[in-house]
Image: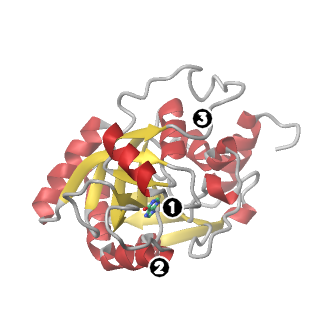
């Protein structure tokens, strides 16, 4: 980002995207591990590789395609991030939330964040979906650390409705209508890339968490800062470390998210229609 201000970089990225799209998107969607197929269901899609967008970070994880897909999902125009950025990849917190701030500069108002998560709540099961009601982040710095960009948001900003209550109410209603079971609970952020230790998972449970994961929270904080309303949905891909005797692996995470991807896609598409 050389000697340009954050606002200049965001504006250049937003202008680049705006010049290539056919209609203005109203909802942004960030797709988690194994949930990327939704991007292939977008019609009249314009695909913009991250590497072509000025100042955009570029994703490094296999299975994260690394492009914006903008087009129609049902009757709505959406902007979908197929491939997201994680702190464990080496990005600084401020770099990994750059796309969220670009969305805001483009004029978007709603953001759906999705992820694969480890299930901490012992009475739930892998394969279940959870609406994020709140989060806990005890590790790593805040993405808003450093000089504040007043044009985006205030220095000190509220997190009490970071996972928008009225969007959650709509999601709950739609899940019920579709007959898709939907849990609701607290997501605790860990930086990864190691999965948590059993002691950390017990700690998370004691603290009030229902799920643990390595994404979403930096983006939700940046969204709260710039006034984007967030809906968060986790797919419980595995019981978190120590809940069962089974060791954790990425293969299981991907297999579970693929197994429930159809249900997940139906729910997200339906929510997009209603919000
Ligand atoms: N921990 C952290 N992140 C995850 C997990 C987990 O158990 N499963 C999927 N993402």
Does residue 208 appear left or right of residue 149 in this picture?
left
The residue tagged 3 is 142
- Mark 1 residue's CB less than 8 Å from ligand 1: yes
Does residue 275 appear left or right of residue 51 in this picture?
left
Q: Earlier in the sequence, mark 3 or mark 1?
A: 3
Name the residue located 71 percent from the left edge and 28 percent from the top edge: 146
Q: Secondary structure at mark 3?
A: loop
Give me the C-alpha separation between circle 1 and circle 2: 13 Å
Name the residue located 28 percent from the left edge and 68 percent from the top edge: 126
Q: Nearer the viewer, residue 88 or 182?
A: 88
Q: Are marks 3 and 1 in contact (CB under 8 Å)?
A: no
User: Tag 1: Cα neighbours inside 10 Å, few (<14), some, or many (≥20)?
Assistant: many
Q: Is residue 216 visible?
A: yes
Q: Is residue 27 visible?
A: no
Give residue 195's mark: 1
Q: x and y percent of residue 84 in the render?
A: 57, 60
Q: Nearer the viewer, mark 2 or mark 3?
A: 2
User: Tag 2: Cα neighbours inside 10 Å, few (<14), some, or many (≥20)?
Assistant: few
Name the residue located 40 percent from the left edge and 52 percent from the top edge: 201
Does residue 20 appear left or right of residue 243 in this picture?
right
Q: Nearer the viewer, mark 3 or mark 1?
A: 1
Image quarter for residue 60? bottom right
Image quarter for residue 90? bottom right
Give me the C-alpha separation between circle 3 and circle 1: 21 Å
Q: Quadrant of ligand 1?
A: bottom left
Q: x and y percent of residue 129 in the render?
A: 27, 61
- Could you tell me which quadrant the N terminus lies in? top right
Q: Secondary structure at mark 1?
A: loop
Q: Nearer the viewer, residue 83 or 75?
A: 83
User: Tag 3: Cα neighbours inside 10 Å, few (<14), some, or many (≥20)?
Assistant: some
- Mark 2 residue's CB less than 8 Å from ligand 1: no
The residue tagged 2 is 251
């Amino acid at each position: 980002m050389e000697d340009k201000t954050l606002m200049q970089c965001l504006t250049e990225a937003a202008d680049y995207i705006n010049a290539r799209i056919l209609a203005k998107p109203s909802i942004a969607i960030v797709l988690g591990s194994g949930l990327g197929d939704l991007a292939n269901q977008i019609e009249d899609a314009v695909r913009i590789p991250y590497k072509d967008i000025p100042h955009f970070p570029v994703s490094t994880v296999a299975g994260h395609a690394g492009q914006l897909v903008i087009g129609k999902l049902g009757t709505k125009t959406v902007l979908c991030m197929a491939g997201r950025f994680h702190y464990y990849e080496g990005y600084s917190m401020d770099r990994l939330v750059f796309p969220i701030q670009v969305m805001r500069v483009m004029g978007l108002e709603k953001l759906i964040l999705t992820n694969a998560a480890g299930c901490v709540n012992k009475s739930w099961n892998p394969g279940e979906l959870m609406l994020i009601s709140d989060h806990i982040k005890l590790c790593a710095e805040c993405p808003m650390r450093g000089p504040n960009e007043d044009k985006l948001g205030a220095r000190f900003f509220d997190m009490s409705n970071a996972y928008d209550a009225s969007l959650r109410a709509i999601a709950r209603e739609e899940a019920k209508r579709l007959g898709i079971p939907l849990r609701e609970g607290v997501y605790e952020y860990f930086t990864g890339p190691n999965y948590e230790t059993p002691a950390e998972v017990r700690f998370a449970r004691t603290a009030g968490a229902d799920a643990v994961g390595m994404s979403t929270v930096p983006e939700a904080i940046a969204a709260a800062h710039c006034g984007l309303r967030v809906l968060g949905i986790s797919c419980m891909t595995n019981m978190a470390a120590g809940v069962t005797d089974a060791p954790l692996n990425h293969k299981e995470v991907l297999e579970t998210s693929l197994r429930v991807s159809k249900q997940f896609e139906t729910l997200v598409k339906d929510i997009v229609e209603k919000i």
